[in-house]
Image (cartoon, helix red, strand yellow):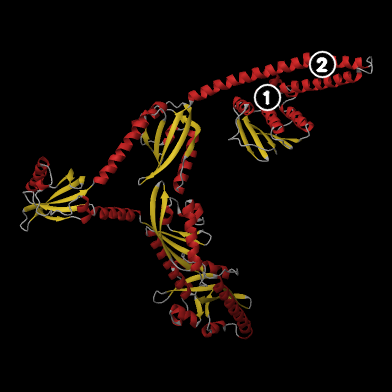
Amino acid sequence: MNPDRTNADPDDNEALRRRVAELEGHVRELQNRFDRQDPFSLPWLCGNSLSTHLLIGLDGHIIDASPTFLRLIGRNRQEVIGRPALSLVLPYDRDTAQKLLNQSLADQATPEAEIDLQGKDGVRTVLLAPGHVPYYVDGDLKAILVTGTDITDRKRAEEALRQSEEYYRVILESVRDAVVVIDSEGRYLFANSGAAASVGRDVSQVVGKTVRDVLPGDFAQNKLQQVRAVIRSGKPATDLSKLVLDGRQVWYHQHLQPLRNAEGQVHAALLVSRDVTEQKHVQEQLSGILSSLYETFVAVYNDRGECLSLWIPQELLERYGMQDQPVAGWNIRNFCPHDEAEVRLQRILQVMRTGQSIRTENVCTLPGGQFVLEVTLSPMRDPEGRISSVVAFVRDVTEQKRSEDALRESEERFRSFAQSARDAIISIDARHRIVYWNQAAEQIFGYTAKEILGRSLTKIMPRRLRAFHRQRVAQRVSQGGALAISRPVETIGLRKDNTEFPVELSVSQWTTTQGVFFTGIARDITERRRHEQVLREIQQKLLHTREEERRRLAAELHDCLGQGLVALHLSLQASLSDTGPALSPALERAVQTCGDLIREVRCISHGLYPPTLESLGLTSALRNLVAYCRSAKVQADLECDGISENTRFDHLVEIAFFRIAQEAVQNALRHGQAGRIRLHLTLKGPELALLVEDDGTGFNPRKVKPGLGLLTMHDRARTIGGRLEIISRRGRTRIRLRARTTPVPDQLQAAKK
């Protein structure tokens, strides 16, 4: 069978099957009739039938064939009858035909098959045989009846279509342009290799994806809008688009053509893109050249320095203050100092003598001021080939020189600043290659500029951070967005000796005609971290000392003053029974006052150092704080997530969290006039977080003068390495504290205390 054969249209196959079934039924009916009348009359059927029939004997030779079969292969009956049936089959299909014939002889069902036949003149024809019918006489198998349909024209049409598709495929794959088909959802239905290569992918990574999956954000959105506009309007469109790839600007000329389905409806758009970046650059250069012509004039001089001919724009004449002066015929000595004129005349003579061009840059003083002129002297020959004069192409580069000088001064100032800076200043391109490295960078990282320039920035990064860095830079460059870190962030650097150290980094992005660049300022904060650690340890000791002093004061208030007041209270109560009516009211007031003092002393003692915090932990201490709020007629709640009543933390952490919560609650009660206070304590992973929220009057954290309470709260947060965030507005104040810590066993907590 033909290995290139493809399945036919399902509707055509179904029609053929119905037709073959009708023919088979007709054959069976005739066979039954002939069995009753003449057991050898089936050959007569083949000889007179209008259908394609072939009667094959048990030995594989042809007994008879219908006229339609003979016409199919271009032979007559004498050429066919008696010859092997397989001799009419093309060689590559003979094995299949033999297998089908053997199955029929074995009384097995045969599948539908396409058989390629060879006509008399070598013309290939195709027979679709839905099955072979065994022919019996008196119960004995006598022959095989093959029925079929001529599908030669259909197969030729299919092969022509397949060949045409292959031609188009080869053409599309051979062109350098990017060719894609995109539907209204932005999905790629087709993409050639040129389209895939333009975005750095394989075809399999493009087809089936959407433009948002393949192209950068804004560019993809614009392209999807253009595709939908073409599908909606049914009209073609042309566009010139700029895409940033790997930090390089690429220009594409794109043509969009609507594609219609069999019903004539536009269902997709054909997009053909051509990279015109080089043409764009040539156009820009040509534009620059044309612009520079307005800054150029041409003069022809003889060997005496006389100007024989001059072409100069009127704008330049006015700029030079020479619009009213005849220039032609001037000697070069007329508008140059004597020494300069002699030098220029000697250059003219040198060109005439050697025939070699000379390019110089001269500062000329003209009536309109001082100008910088770039002069190219070239020989001019007469018809006999002799050098008769010199043509001078003069270009005014005054503004260019001023810009270059300004740029040079700016670069020098930057270089002077960068080299004297104590921070490392490093610049990289879009491919992460280091293009600038100051002296401070040499001292901080240990690499000299010669060692590091041109190397990847990841060389000074720990391996665990490199993938994230590459991904972020590539994403920003491809999307055309700015990668800027205006506020310094802390990260990790890697020295030449492979030691890691903390770095404070800020980054800015800038773009030139050569692409996108990034400059970072890195500061070694090792010493600062060490000082911060020392300061934190001092603060922790101070906090510990302060808490110990609070504990001592609380104990003295409770044990000394508190006990004395209790004794006094009991004595006064005992005296009431022995006192006359005249002194009873006074003693009753004294007893009442003494009771109030006892409660106040206990409240102060518990505020200085709550015993619950030390004995039961942070959660219980916060619940007592909530109870205190409720006693003040304020609605208060405590929520705990990921933490139980028995969960304990480092002693300093518990003290800091409780004191900050205590200060926040007292501020809400005293100054905020809060009616509801909510505390939320959360332990998630290694982070403990506390949120204190109230519905009081609020305040502006930027405008309020920081008092001792706010300063103390920030100090306590820093002492445990935590972060304190205060957000307040009218009707709501949120104070959030976060710190990294882990629960500790009760016995370990006791040992630390």
732 relative position to 68: left or right: right
505 relative position to 580: left or right: left
Instruction: Tell me the quadrant of the picture where the C terminus can be found.
Output: top right
Residue at mark 1: 655
Residue at coordinates 56% horizontally, 73% vertically from top-left?
11
Q: Amino acid at mark 2?
A: Leu
Front residue of 318/213: it is: 318
Q: Does 597 sit above or below residue 334?
A: above
x and y percentages locating residue 138 in the rendered image:
63, 78
Q: Does 511 sit above or below residue 4?
A: above
Q: Does 528 sit above or below residue 518?
A: above
Query: Where on the picture, by quarter, is residue 607?
Result: top right
Q: Does 97 sit above or below residue 277?
A: below
Front residue of 633/622: it is: 633
Q: Amino acid at mark 1?
A: Ile
585 relative position to 336: left or right: right
Between the C-alphas of marks 1 and 2, the distance is 29 Å
Q: Secondary structure at mark 2?
A: helix
x and y percentages locating residue 48 in the rendered image:
52, 85
x and y percentages locating residue 455 in the rendered image:
38, 35
Q: Secondary structure at mark 1?
A: helix
Question: Which label is found at residue 540?
Answer: none
Front residue of 292/89: it is: 292
Residue at mark 2: 565
Nearer the viewer's eye, disc 1 or disc 2?
A: 2
Which of the two labelled residues, at mark 1 and mark 2, occupies the earlier sequence position? 2
